[in-house]
Structure formats: C-alpha cells, structure tokens
Image (cartoon, rainbow, N blue to C red):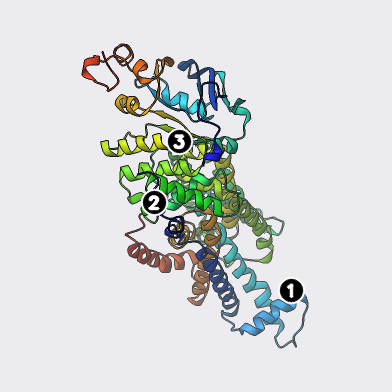
C-alpha cells in the first residue's frame, strides 16, 4: 500500500511518458506536411504553375531577389494575389478554428463543444446576411460591410451568451451551453427570415453559410490574421489554466487558478479568434470539433501539447480540403471537408474505441 | 518530502492553519458560526458531524476558496486572502472531488495536474515535477496504473489516483472531504492507513472530513465534532466520540453504534 520497495531507477522508467518527445516530432512532421501542402496549394489550379516558378515568384515578391525571371505577369498575379492569400487564409483560419475548438471543449469540459458554442456562428451569419441585404455598400480597412458585420455579429452573440449565461460562473457551464443554444436559435430565426426576403441575394447568403475561401485576399487576411494570431497566442500562454479546469472548478481553484477570471479570458479570446475567422471565410464547420480530438489521440490531453498541434493540424486540414475543393471545381470547402473528413474521423474513432470514448 | 515541514505538531508550534472566529453565511443563513481552531504542523485531525453541520463549508473556508463573513483564516500566521492563489496551492493540497474526465487521459498525466501550482506556465514538466508525480503514484500504490486511461478505473482506484494528485502537489497540508465515500471497507482502511502514514512518516498535516465515525476514531488522534455550524467537541476520540456526543450531536442511540473508543 505505502512506499513499495521498487528501486528508484525502475520507478522512473516505469513512468516513461509515451508522449514526451513525440510531440516535437509530430509538430515538425506536421509543419513539413503543411509546407508541402501550401506549395501544392499555390501550384494547383485552373492554370498549372510549377513549384519552382511558384517559389521564385514568392521569393521575388518578398525579397526582390530575381533568379532569372521566367514567369509571366499573369503567373505573378495568380500566385501572389490570388492563390497565396487563399492558401494562407486557409491555414490561418484552420488553425484558429482548431485552437478555438480545443479551448471551448476544455472550458465547458465537453468533447462535443465546437468554436460556435457561444452562438458566434449564428451571430456571424445574421451579421453577414444583413450586410448582404443592406442597400448601401462601404468599406473600411479594405473590408467589405459583410465581413465587418459578420465579425460584429459573432462577437455580439458571444458577449450576449456570456452575459446572460452567467459569465462562466462556477458550475454554470450547462447554463452557458443552453444559453448559447437559445440565443443561436433566435438569431437563426432572424437569419431564416432574412433569407426568406432576400430574393436574388439568397445565393450570396447561402455561400457565406457554406463557408469558402474564394473571397480570400491580402487585405482581409492582413486584418483578420493579427487578431487570430494574437488571440491564439494568448490562449496558448494560458494552457495550464485549461489543464486545471479538466477536473472541474473546485479542483482548478485548489490548483491556484482564478477560475472565473481565466475562464472569462479564455472564452473571450476563443470567441475573438472564431469571429475573425468566420468574418473572412464564412461558416466552416468540422475543423474545430474534430481536429482537437484527433490531436488528443496523438499527443494526449494536456493543453500545452493539444493547442499547438491542433493549430498545425487544423491548418493542414483546411488547406488540403480547399485543395480538393478547387480540384473538384470550386465546391464549398465545408462540404468537401465533411465528406472526406468525417469518414476518416469515424475510422479513427472505431480503431481507438478501446482507449477513447467521446 | 520531510524538508517541507516543520517539526511534528506540538501544541506550542505556530499553527500552520488557523481559523479565528470564522463565520460563513449563504443567503442570510449561517452555515459556519464563530468557529476557532488551529491545525499544528504535522497534525492529523478528522472533522465529523451530521449532514449540514458546516464541515465542508468550513473546509472550503480554511482552504481560502470561500471568504468568511467575519473572522480570519491564517496560513502560517498570514491572513490567507492576502496570500496569492498559487502560494496557497503550494501549501494546501486538496484531494479533488471524484469527477469524470472529459477526455481520455493516462493516470500519470492526471496525477501530473497536481504539479500545476509549481509548473512554470509555458514549459512542460521538469525533472522535479516528474519525480513528484512518480513518487506520489508510488506512495499511493497506483504506479502500475500509470498508463491506464483514468476513465476506465474502478471507484477505489480512482480515489487513490485523486489522492495521488494532491500528493504530487507536495504541500505540507493535505485536505480531504469524504475520501472514503464510495469505497468498500478494504479501500477505506487502505486510504486511512495511507493518511496515517503520510502524516506520521512524512509529517504532513492531514485534515479530513469523515462521515464514518469508526474510521475517525480508529485512525485519527484528534477528532473535531461540528454541529449546527459550531465546534461542539475537539480532542482525542475517546473524549469527543463518547456516548453523550453520539446522542446529542448525531441524535442516535449510542448502543446502536459501538465505536472502539466508547467505553460506556
């Protein structure tokens, strides 16, 4: 029962951490895969551009270095102005949604949570629909009114749910989730009404709801990316708070964590990242729910490992889904992801059923 | 571990934890009423009393989670609300309530959560953290469960793992609320023996809320009896768990509950 007579060395090896070291390898492999996918993503399209031309254009644009110019102006535009921002947007949004998903799942201690539990999706959708239907059009920071209203809608919905849902008070997670559901339903009703009266704009609204990277541009990316990166970095710094919450509020408190404050901060940060992502790409589902689970199968549950690996995996998933979507004639990326990703996830769940239950 | 603590509890030692006239109210209802008592370093005491006596509330006040309406809780003589949360967590380890984890997690990573108060925010576990986790699992006898998913454990195993979390915190005060609630008699005795050993061999102070008076009487040299938010008896079990208190506090005919310490 008490101290056993096991030699110290044996104890230490018996306690081998099967995830230690492995996380670094997975991260490096993931970054390599992502790099290759991004180059492929810029290469592939209706106009084939070789990987060397692709890299040469990027190098030229970034550093002014000219390795003997062999490409046309059209190639330059396609690579630099169209495909590169699109691929980068896919990577950044994929990472944002995966980190937000991992964060929400940890905060509400529920594996079914996704980045939209606080109603950000409905808020963004309604905001976008209003932006589409308004007879005015203006742009600030090179962003369209649709993006701006989607962002505002997402943030407003999250704040409303957070306030009404008790601000993440002790034991209030169920209340928070139910509030998110109720507010989401109200917003969805307004959205349906907006779609009903939208007439010819219906397709535009629908495109936002399906999510897509067709509208990606440097301007939008450069506004959204800093918000996303700052929020994600701030979440990653708070990994230990997320870990502390795994055993519930009381335990977290006894680990020296200011539960209310930390949870509030994490909810706000994850909602910011989500809102910035949906504002530029529309509603992309699946990444935020599924990626953290796949990552936990690989590296275990501690947030310190789950968050960075989720970012890489989310980027990989969205970049590759966009690649497939474009090869299939520009299908909505969310549709492609669910059609290819969900079966893959099912297989994983089936294989891991002994050690992993949702 | 022994370096953590000051000499074994003599009544003269500065209390490591103390309550001075602590009163706690919820919605106008007085749950803890003007309670004063000391825990000496290296002392082991059980807190008993009927349901609603205020035991758990007192415990949560003593650990700094609840703010008393009036009165003061001191940790090593310092008012606990002036001590920052992580410092408190390094001094007082509370065995977490048995909960289900939301995700699959091997036992050693669950136990490693006890290192959070020591963990620098960004790095992973350091060598000393791994040592503390390994030795906590060893001490509780769950080392062979190390790689098992914590969600597949039996109640008894899970309780031991949760004790290990608190041990990994390497705090000089160990606090438990009903640590034997879901356990069979063998596991109950095992947990009690472990607490006695942690107290006697390592010199940790142990404060446990218990419902089982026989366990309290058998394994704790000091038993504090609470009723209606007040401490009504405090001392060795022979004095505090006598027939009179059994009748007056618990409202039970003492002849129906024969405790080993009861002579009358």
| Nearest to viewer (mark 2 / mark 3) | 2
**Residue designated by label 2:** A5
Residue closest to the eye, A66 or A258: A258
Residue A293, percent across and down? Answer: 44, 58
Position of the C terminus of chain A by quadrant? bottom left
Residue B107, percent across and down? Answer: 41, 51
Residue at 50% from the left image edge and 77% from the top image edge? A327
The CA distance from mark 2 to mark 3 is 42 Å
Residue A185, percent across and down? Answer: 45, 44
Q: Do marks 1 and 2 share a chain? A: yes
Position of the N terminus of chain A by quadrant? top left
The label shown at residue A171 is 3
User: Dot 2, how many residues are within 10 Å of its Cα: few (below 14), some (14-19), or many (20+)?
Assistant: few
Residue A352, percent across and down? Answer: 35, 62
The CA distance from mark 1 to mark 3 is 51 Å
**Residue designated by label 1:** A62
Residue at 37% from the left image edge and 50% from the top image edge? B150
Residue at 68% from the left image edge and 61% from the top image edge? A222
The CA distance from mark 1 to mark 2 is 63 Å
């Amino acid at each position: 029962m008490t101290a056993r007579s096991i030699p110290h060395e044996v104890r230490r090896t018996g306690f081998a951490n099967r995830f230690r070291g492995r996380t670094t390898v997975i991260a490096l492999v993931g970054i390599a895969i992502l790099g290759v996918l991004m180059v492929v993503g810029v290469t592939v399209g209706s106009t084939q551009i070789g990987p060397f031309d692709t890299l040469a254009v990027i190098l030229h644009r970034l550093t002014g270095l000219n390795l003997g110019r062999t490409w046309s102006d059209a190639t330059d535009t396609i690579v630099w102005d169209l495909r590169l921002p699109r691929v980068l947007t896919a990577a950044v949004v994929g990472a944002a949604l995966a980190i937000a998903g991992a964060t929400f799942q940890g905060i509400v201690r529920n594996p079914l949570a996704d980045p939209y539990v606080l109603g950000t999706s409905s808020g963004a959708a309604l905001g976008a629909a209003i932006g589409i239907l308004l007879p005015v059009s203006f742009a600030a920071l090179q962003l369209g009114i649709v993006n701006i209203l989607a962002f505002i809608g997402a943030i407003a919905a999250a704040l409303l749910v957070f306030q009404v849902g008790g601000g993440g008070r002790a034991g209030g997670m169920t209340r928070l989730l139910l509030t998110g559901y109720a507010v989401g339903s109200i917003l969805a009703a307004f959205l349906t009404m907006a779609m009903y009266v939208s007439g010819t704009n219906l397709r535009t609204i629908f495109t936002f709801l399906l999510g897509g990277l067709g509208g990606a541009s440097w301007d939008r990316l450069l506004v959204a990316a800093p918000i996303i990166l700052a929020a994600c970095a701030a979440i990653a710094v708070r990994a230990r708070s997320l870990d502390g919450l795994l055993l519930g509020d009381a335990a977290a408190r006894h680990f020296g964590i200011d539960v209310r404050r930390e949870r509030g901060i994490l909810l706000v940060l994850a909602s910011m990242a989500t809102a910035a992502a949906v504002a530029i790409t529309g509603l992309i589902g699946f990444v935020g729910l599924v990626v953290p689970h796949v990552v936990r199968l690989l590296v275990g549950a501690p947030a310190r490992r789950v968050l960075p690996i989720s970012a890489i995996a989310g980027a990989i998933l969205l970049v590759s889904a966009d690649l497939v979507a474009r090869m299939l004639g520009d299908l909505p990326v969310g549709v492609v992801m669910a059609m290819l990703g969900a079966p893959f996830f099912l297989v994983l769940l089936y294989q891991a059923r002994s050690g992993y239950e949702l | 571990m022994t370096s953590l603590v000051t000499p074994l509890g003599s009544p003269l030692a500065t209390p490591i934890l103390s309550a001075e006239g602590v009163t706690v109210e919820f919605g106008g209802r007085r749950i803890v009423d003007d309670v004063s008592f000391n825990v000496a370093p290296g002392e082991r005491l059980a807190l008993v009393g009927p349901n609603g006596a205020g035991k758990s509330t007192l415990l949560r006040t003593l650990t700094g989670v609840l703010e008393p309406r009036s009165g003061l809780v001191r940790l090593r003589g310092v008012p606990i609300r002036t001590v920052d949360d992580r410092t408190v967590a390094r001094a007082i380890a509370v065995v977490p309530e048995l909960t289900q984890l939301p995700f699959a997690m091997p036992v050693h990573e669950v136990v490693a959560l006890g290192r959070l108060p020591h963990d620098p925010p960004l790095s992973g576990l350091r060598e000393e953290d791994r040592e503390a986790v390994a030795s906590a699992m060893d001490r509780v006898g769950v080392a062979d469960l190390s790689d098992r998913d914590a969600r597949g454990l039996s109640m008894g195993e899970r309780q031991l793992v949760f004790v290990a979390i608190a041990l990994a915190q390497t705090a000089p005060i160990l606090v438990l609320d009903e640590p034997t609630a879901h356990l069979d008699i063998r596991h109950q005795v095992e947990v009690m023996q472990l607490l006695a050993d942690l107290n006697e061999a390592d010199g940790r102070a142990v404060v446990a809320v218990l419902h089982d008076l026989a366990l309290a009487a058998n394994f704790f040299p000091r038993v504090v009896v609470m009723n209606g938010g007040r401490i009504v008896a405090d001392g060795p079990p022979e004095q505090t768990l006598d027939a009179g208190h059994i009748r007056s506090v618990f409202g039970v005919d003492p002849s129906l509950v024969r405790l080993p310490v009861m002579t009358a």
